[in-house]
Amino acid sequence: MARQTNSNFFLALICGQVTLWDVRTQDRYALDGIHVRRIIEIWQGDELRDSEVDETIRRSGVFEEDPTLSDWKWDILARIFHRGTRVTLKPGMELPSEDNYEGYLKYCASIVKDMPELLTRRDGHTIDLPAVEAESMPAQNLWATLQRRKTCRDFHASAVDLDCLSQVMYWSFGAIHGGTHQDLAEAGLLQAGYRRAAPSAGSLQATEVYLAAFHVKTLPPGIYHYRSDTHQLTKIQDGACGTHVARLLGAQMFAKDLSFGIFFTSRFDKLWWKYPGSRAYRVALLDVGALLQTFLLVSTALGLETWPTGHFYDDETNKLLGVDGTRETTLFFAGAGHGSGSPFCPSAQRTIARPVKAAAEMAPNTSSET
């Protein structure tokens, strides 16, 4: 009978080396053939022996049970992500008691020579979006906007004005705090990147946004990259087809009636540079979430209905955007436009209506005359 293994461990082939990886502690053990064979033999039911090889295997903890994950419901890949992206204290370590900002600054100084290009520039025809003035955003009560914000799946395939799109892009994703970090310059620190309304890890703004324009007045349908720091669009490809994008989104076909959609990607190469640990993947997802919520609220304040989804075919979507899926990859999508506000798409409404109608026809007539 096979012996139970610790679910925090997995075997991997890394650069031709068999590696036993403990995602709980991030410890890695390079295994030779003898250790690999013994792990397999023990897993198949052999008893641990009094030998140096078996003692090494015993100390690794690979055959110790971990009750903390007994209720885990997702698959092993999600479990590896959950465990492998945690920040933990090693045995014998204590929580830090002093501000380590000096150490952080030294770390930043040590990596600055390897800083990647922080401004994303895609090749293609560049379009200036209409300028946005501060007073152009209508005064909105935050509470009222939060109440109105809900997911819509019934859109009218009607066009929005380019000025409206420009405002959505600028307030959601633009460098509204200016193109420089004046406070950093005044402190004698290097200025890098720009600031949006939403927070971003290390102010790296690792999230890029790509516009899928379907129904925007005076803007040809197409896929565009948005340059946050200059408020411009760079055309990636002509003729964005709403039907094709809807199919990419798992055949959620009502998406073809959006006025426009936003693909959120993450430039992992920025995060790898400053945050090399796997924890940074969580940060990438949180960065997207912060921008997404800003987009949803801004769009709602400007009178648009919105719809977010995380369901899409990754490889095909990355191909549409012209990103490699490794250094930069798609993480989310959200759309906006004019619609009924219903959370049900037309096909769902028809499906729901059929049994309701049938039930009404079968109900006895209980009306009475007076």
Image: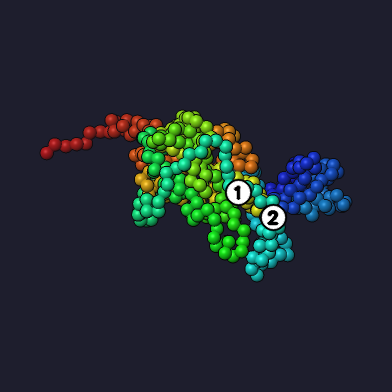
Q: Amino acid at mark 1?
A: Leu
Q: Residue at x 72, y 50 (%)?
A: 22
Classed neighbour count for the residue bearing mark 2: other residues with Cα under 10 Å, few (<14), some (14–19), many (≥20): few
Q: Amino acid at mark 2?
A: Ile
Give residue 111's mark.
Answer: 2
Q: Residue at x 45, y 45 (%)?
A: 169
- In front of the other: 179 or 73: 179
Residue with the most extreme bottom position? 98
- In front of the other: 85 or 62: 85
| Label 2 element class | helix
- In this view of the protein, can residue 355 be seen by the observer? no
- In front of the other: 177 or 336: 177
For label 1, the residue is: 118
- In this view of the protein, can residue 303 be seen by the observer? yes
Q: Residue at x 39, y 36 (%)?
A: 217
Q: Residue at x 39, y 43 (%)?
A: 163
Residue with the most extreme right position? 51
| Label 1 element class | loop
